[in-house]
Structures are given as C-alpha cells and as structure tokens.
Image (tube, rainbow, N blue to C red):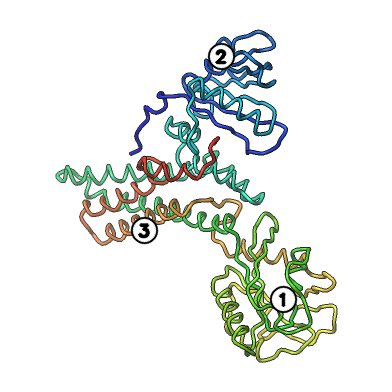
Amino acid sequence: MHGNRNILADDTICAPATAPGQGAVGIVRLSGPEAVATADRHFTASTGISLTAAPSHTVHHGHFLDADGTPVDEVLVLLMLSPRSYTTQDVVEIQCHGGGAAVQAVLGCLVAAGCRMAEPGEFTRRAFLSGRIDLTQAEAVLEVIEARTDLAQRLAQRQLEGALSRELARATEALRELVAHLEAAIDFPEDDLEEELPEATVAALEATHQTLADVAGRARAGNLVKEGVRLAILGRPNVGKSSLLNAMLGHDRAIVTDVPGTTRDVLEAELVVDGIRFVVQDTAGIRDPGDAIEAEGIARSRRAAVGADLVLLVLDGAQALDNADRTLLHELDGARTLLALNKSDLPTRLVPPDGREALPVSAHTGDGIDTLRAALVAAVRDKKAAPLAHAFLVTLRQRDAIERAATALGQALSALRGGAYPELVATDLRGALDAVGEVTGETTTDDLLDRIFSRFCIGK
C-alpha cells in the first residue's frame, strides 16, 4: 500500500509551471499549508487586499516584491484554497512576465522565504496521495502532456477524466465480492454456500474476466495510437516506393533516382492521418543482391516487414507481374498487407493475382494518394478488436499488470470449472485484485511512485 500521506502537511513546495525560455507569461506554482501566507508576504495587490483574506478561486493584480520590498515584476496571482485545488492543498499560481529572469527571481524569493523546490511530478503526486485522483489518472496527466496527435490527446483526456479508472473500479468491486463469497465458503463449509457457489460465481467471474479482457484489448489498441503504427513499404527496386513515401508525406523525405537500389537502408518518417500516427519505413528494393551492402539492406527490409503492424507492398502497374513480385506476395502476411498499384498515370499491364484488391496510385501525379491514406486508417481500425476511439493509453507497467490480472482470472475460471477447492480459486482472485491495484495505485509502493513521477516535469 502507498504510504507517506503525512508529506502533504510537511512543507510548502514551489516550481515553475511553464517551460524555460522566452514567452509572454511565466507561471510559478506553490502548494502547501504556507502557500498563501508565503505569497502574501511578497505580494502587494492593486486593490490593497491581503491574499490571506481573499476568497478562493479569485485573481488579483499587483506587484511581486523581494525581501526588501523592491518590486520584482508586475504579476497576476491566482488563489485556489483547499480542498478545491489540483493538489487539494492551498495552491497559489503567480503569473509573471515570461523569460528566465522574472521566473527565477520569483522562485528565489519564495525559496528564501521557506518554500522547497518541488520534485518532478510532486504536484500530481500530492493530488494522488490526497485521493483526488487515482494512479491511472495521475499517469494520464503525462499522457496528455506527451500526446503527439489529436486522437492521442483526446484519449489521454478521457483517461484523465476517469475512463480507465471506472472500468477498473467495476472489476475491483466484483473481485472483492467474489473473494468475500469464496472466503465465506472456506470459513463456513457447513452452510449451503457451496451449493450456490459454482453457478453464481462462475457467471460473475466470467463477466469480470470479460471486463478485464476488454480493457487489455483497448490497451493494446492504445499502444498503436501512442507508439504509432509501424508501416513498412516493400517492393522490388524501381517500383516507386520512395516516390510514394514522398507523395504520402507531401514533401521529399527519401532520395529518388532512376537507378535501381538507390535506397540501401531502412528510412523512417512520421505520417499522421485522421489522428493516427504512422511510423513509415521506406525499405531497400528486394531482389537478388549485387553486393554485400545491398544484401544487408535487403535483409533489413525483410526484418522491417516482420516487425511491422502493416505492410504496403508496392507493385509497378506499368509492368507485368514478375517473379520477385510473386515471391513477395507469397511471403507476406495477407492479413496485414495492402497492395498499391503504382504508376496509374501510365497504361496498366499488371493484374493482381487471385483476385486480390490493389489500390491504383500515382506517386508522380498524386492520384489515389488520399484514397491510400484512408485505406491505411481503415486497415488499422478494422484489425483492432477495440475501436481506437475507445482505446486506453497505458504504460508498459500498466499493460503488464492488466494482462496479469486477466490471466489470473482465466486461471481462476478454469480452476472453478474443474472443481478446485475454493482456497485455490481465491488465491488467483487475490492475485488479480493485487494486479489491478498496481494500476489504480491501491497496492503500490513509494519506490514505484518515485519511478512513476520522476518522468514528470518539475512543475507538474
């Protein structure tokens, strides 16, 4: 269980809440029992009001003064009193002019007055330790900050609002009831609980297992949003792979020449379509290599195809299908491979085998590129059991814990159906409960919290 709740009353912390560098506004944040009094000693309001007498959630204009009473900067002060604040403590935010000098001057005065510089993520950690948010919401704060696409930002915001927390809370409540019921059967075997146990418990266990399996699936879907969909572009030399990459990106990223084998290594670029981030890999043309360097490039192309979430096989529509094309069509996993028939601006001579659908595109004119982008998005969405719009953005630690919980429930179901003793089933259920608690923060340690919040910036 997490401890050290008394740190909430120990001291008052301060930190810059805006990134270093030039900007219009720089924000310094304070939190703790002396936040208001400390800020008030250095602040003169234009209205003459004292911050200690001001109501919560009010904004005050004035000047921030150093210890000698000399004005440091013209500022706005935002007052948020406990418990209606981010940390549930008294919180003060001082908005001064942007740039390092003003922010550092304000911070220097506050530290000299007794404030402690906050550790990374300490404001969010205090919000978690006070019970205002659980650990899934705390970690979602970082997901919001690090989101690289609109979809990732929306998903992170839903998680911050408690979407994942609510799903796990349902599972936790159900698991607690199941454990209590099993322990009653263990402690009072003379009662009639054992006769009622199998049917009622199996049904409840199945439902909870399905809930966690659904969460695990949505977490896997979220990994594609968070990390990006790895898309490998494959094909034999001179079919237009690099030209197609440039056309999809809308700018020149890959070198394009008429010389076969120009691309000798895997080249990566980022493409965002409908909020989905693709990590696109342009690979060396696959053929019988002419030298050791080309052979290594082709080997890397094949490894990229194996590790990709999707493969875009590019065929030259202006030429008949050759043996190299047939080999690639045979080798690649059809379930995660899309075919692009490039050079649609020229007379078509290639017919895809076995009635396979191929998207006609022209890297030269741009025809069909929008359709290709849409097909990539559809392929990602169609191949995920969980819709991306309802995915969960989780860390590797969270995903591991969720999957361990689902596995433990699967073992409990098998044991229950096999007539195992309630003690054995209860052990699996407690394991699942502990694993879920690792995600929500109910069964965690200070050391783990240190590792989690060390990833945050100082002012968050």
Circles 2 and 1, Cβ within 8 Å, touching? The answer is no
**In this view, the mark in front (2 or 1):** 2
- The label on residue 143 is none
Residue 173, placed above or below residue 266:
above
Taking depth in this image into account, of 282 and 74 the one nearest to the observer is: 74
Left or right side of 431 for 127? right
Instruction: Give the residue number, with chain letter if any, for mark 1.
Output: 241
Type of the residue with mark 3: Thr
Earlier residue among tags 1 and 3 = 1
Instruction: Give the residue number, with chain letter if any, for mark 3.
Output: 407
Residue 175, placed above or below residue 82:
below
**In this view, the mark in front (1 or 3):** 1
Q: Residue at x 82, y 69 (%)?
A: 366
Q: CA distance from mark 1 to mark 3?
A: 42 Å
Type of the residue with mark 1: Lys
Type of the residue with mark 2: Arg
Q: Residue at x 37, y 53 (%)?
A: 405
Q: Residue furthest top?
A: 48
